[in-house]
């Protein structure tokens, strides 16, 4: 029986379309819709335990306690450094994913702000509500060294509420207050005022480009010397018309760029996209925006969400900047090295305030390591977007606020990234030259506890409390820590690794074929699964290893970027499957990333029976793997009715052109 063709593709809880997001002013969003919502499962994990003697825990106001093993070097543990922060949270353990660390030659220098000093990566953002009440929370941000703010009242309707009538009072008050707090404002060029009857509300004003151009010219000229960075629209194609295209956004960008440069030749204009929507940016450049921007802005909430939910997905996050640069090198070579900003990124506190703090540390650490110029955490204080602030509405500081302060204190306002290390041959660590000494930011891969040994006593900082204690051996968890005064051997290794790609298990990126074979322990050779050993029920079926097809939301797969990323090559994807013992009707479709977004390959595949293993093949000529939603392709059964099958293996093979 063939299943009727489905019109829409969805991974349960993982995707959020523009129609699902709250329309309106920038920064208003539904957090729950953005987070990956893979159902949790239980998994037994074997761990090698080394007897340790723990000194008393250092308590924290967030409930985190720092433990300090005092045993000597554990057998089989090489010289490396790490620490664990014990928490009461259970982490979902997923398979490792891939990443590429940008070469230092490709990392853009931080552009200077209005003061002439290079921008700091430590920035903050605001929603519609909190952008109107800066005095309630900006002093706390300024107090810990945050110097960049994306919150100005600069929209079209704000400054020209009636045609030809310009009002600057509210903007000038904001700018004056921000300057007194030593804040550099980032401006947003967006919106269409009510008096513009040529364009419907909520659309790019492409039918009134003269008015749009005049708006840009007037506001850039008015704020000259006070706002240098101007971002064109907020995370398009969000907040645009459903039928509006990359061509429409390109028109807005070109008009804004020309008008802004004429008004202030020293200003910088940003090309924007939601999430890590590389395909959209590519289409905008092809549509005419080429050379009409000075930097790119992204909002990688979804990719950070995979890090938060599924320990081990950090490499996907680390591949964001290299991926953008690869696209620019093809589509706009003259702009291949432009600065990249994360003008929004964050998470709410629904999984716990400590988890939010951990996410902040990881986002800034990996963002800075891959060359992101500025990261504006969303947001400073809770507003109309839910509990996402570093501060509660009452002004009480969350652990994430202290984490931000700790990072700035030990990495400095303008951190110098030295390189990465692999601790105990599996845990990522990122080394920086701080204002006083070197600092290693690190946490456990996949959240699996592991004891490491420095070989010497070093200070360890808990970023959520700022507490520092000294020890020589530590147990690692998914909670990040800062190791200060990093042993020289580790620093030397980090410097040597800086220009190299992060390792990814048993990868074979130079091979013509990559695969994953399911079992009690998946065998991943260049192809990794986001469905995860801890989420999908691994089964031993029909005398061999397999995975149950009834994975919440589907089986998600990530290709090693060293094997195939952005560049489109003919490939063949094969899957080996059979029905369950009850011989229930089962099937799925293959949905993959292409230059035009997610596409379905061929038609629905019905698994024939449970008498033998069946191989299904798809030949694809237009795949463009960019990890827009954090994965590259999926086997999607559209719910629980047709997913009663077993999956033995999946293979991706490059075909001769």
Image (tube, rainbow, N blue to C red):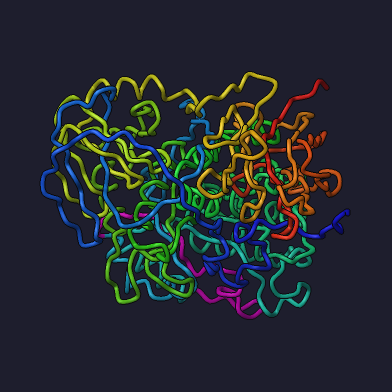
Please identify the dominant SS of the magenta region: loop
Camera-side residue: 411 or 351? 351
Residue 22 seen in this snapshot: yes
Q: Is residue 51 left or right of residue 19?
A: left
Camera-side residue: 521 or 175? 521
Q: Is residue 35 above or below residue 435?
A: below
The residue drawn where x is 65% and y is 52% is 550
The residue drawn where x is 19% and y is 45% is 67
**Residue 488 figure quarter:** top left
The residue drawn where x is 21% and y is 44% is 461
Q: Is residue 117 above or below residue 651?
A: below
Percent from the top left, x then y, of residue 657? 83, 22
Q: Is residue 33 left or right of residue 227?
A: right
Q: Which residues are magenta?
A: 143-168
Q: Is residue 586 left or right of residue 395?
A: right
Percent from the top left, x then y, of residue 595? 75, 42
Q: Is residue 168 left or right of residue 640?
A: left
Camera-side residue: 37 or 99? 37
Q: How many marks?
A: 0
Residue 335 seen in this snapshot: no
Percent from the top left, x then y, of residue 380? 38, 64
């Amino acid at each position: 029986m063939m299943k009727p063709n489905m019109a829409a593709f969805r991974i349960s809880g993982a995707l959020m379309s523009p129609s699902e997001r709250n329309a309106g002013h920038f920064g208003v969003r539904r957090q729950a819709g953005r987070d990956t919502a893979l159902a949790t499962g239980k998994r037994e994990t074997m761990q090698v335990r080394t007897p340790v003697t723990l000194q008393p825990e250092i308590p924290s106001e967030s409930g985190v306690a720092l433990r300090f093993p005092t045993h000597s070097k554990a057998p089989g543990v090489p010289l490396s450094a790490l620490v664990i922060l014990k928490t009461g949270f259970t982490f979902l353990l997923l398979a490792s994913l891939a990443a590429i660390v940008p070469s230092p030659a490709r990392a853009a220098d931080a552009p200077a702000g209005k003061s002439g000093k290079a921008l700091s990566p430590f920035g903050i953002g605001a929603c519609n509500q909190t952008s109107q009440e800066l005095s309630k929370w900006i002093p706390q941000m300024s107090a810990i060294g945050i110097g960049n703010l994306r919150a100005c009242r600069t929209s079209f309707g704000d400054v020209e509420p009636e045609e030809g009538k310009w009002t600057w009072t509210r903007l000038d008050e904001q700018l004056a207050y921000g300057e007194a707090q030593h804040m550099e404002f980032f401006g947003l060029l967006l919106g269409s005022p009510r008096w513009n009857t040529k364009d419907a509300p909520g659309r790019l004003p492409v039918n009134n480009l003269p008015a749009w151009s005049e708006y840009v010219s007037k506001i850039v000229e008015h704020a000259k010397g006070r706002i240098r960075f101007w971002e064109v629209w907020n995370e398009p194609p969000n907040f645009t018309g459903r039928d509006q295209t990359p061509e429409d956004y390109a028109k807005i960008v070109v008009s804004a760029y020309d008008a802004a440069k004429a008004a202030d030749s020293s200003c910088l204009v940003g090309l924007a996209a939601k999430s890590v929507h590389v395909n959209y940016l590519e289409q905008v450049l092809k549509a005419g925006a080429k050379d009409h921007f000075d930097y790119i802005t992204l909002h990688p909430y979804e990719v950070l969400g995979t890090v938060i939910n599924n320990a081990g997905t950090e490499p996907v996050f680390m591949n964001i900047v290299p991926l953008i640069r690869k696209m620019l090198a093809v589509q706009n070579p003259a702009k291949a090295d432009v600065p990249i900003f994360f003008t929004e990124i964050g998470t709410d506190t629904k999984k716990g305030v400590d988890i939010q703090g951990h996410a902040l540390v990881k986002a800034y650490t990996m963002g800075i390591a891959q060359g992101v110029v500025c990261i504006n955490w969303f947001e400073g204080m809770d507003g109309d977007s839910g509990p996402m602030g570093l501060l509660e509405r009452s002004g009480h500081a969350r652990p994430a606020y202290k984490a931000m302060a700790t990072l700035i204190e030990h990495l400095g306002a303008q951190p110098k990234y030295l390189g990465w290390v692999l601790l105990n041959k599996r845990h990522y660590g990122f080394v920086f030259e701080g204002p006083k000494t070197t600092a290693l930011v690190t946490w456990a891969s996949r959240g699996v506890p592991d004891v490491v040994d420095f070989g010497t006593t070093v200070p360890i900082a808990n970023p959520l409390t700022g507490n520092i204690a000294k020890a020589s051996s530590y147990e690692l968890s998914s909670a990040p820590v800062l190791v200060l005064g990093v042993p020289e051997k580790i620093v030397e290794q980090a410097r040597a690794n800086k220009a190299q790609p992060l390792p990814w298990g048993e990868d074979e990126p130079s091979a013509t074929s990559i695969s994953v074979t399911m079992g009690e322990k998946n065998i991943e050779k260049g192809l990794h699964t986001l469905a995860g050993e801890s989420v999908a029920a691994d089964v031993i079926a029909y005398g061999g290893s397999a995975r149950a097809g009834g994975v919440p939301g589907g089986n998600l797969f990530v290709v090693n970027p060293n094997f195939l990323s952005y560049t489109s090559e003919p490939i063949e994807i094969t899957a080996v499957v059979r029905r369950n013992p009850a011989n229930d009707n089962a099937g799925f479709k293959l949905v993959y990333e292409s230059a035009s977004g997610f596409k379905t390959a061929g038609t629905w595949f019905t698994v024939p029976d449970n008498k033998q293993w069946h191989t299904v093949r798809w030949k694809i000529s237009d795949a463009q793997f960019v990890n827009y939603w954090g994965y590259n392709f999926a086997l999607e059964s559209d719910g629980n009715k047709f997913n009663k099958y077993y999956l033995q293996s999946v293979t991706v093979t490059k075909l001769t052109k």
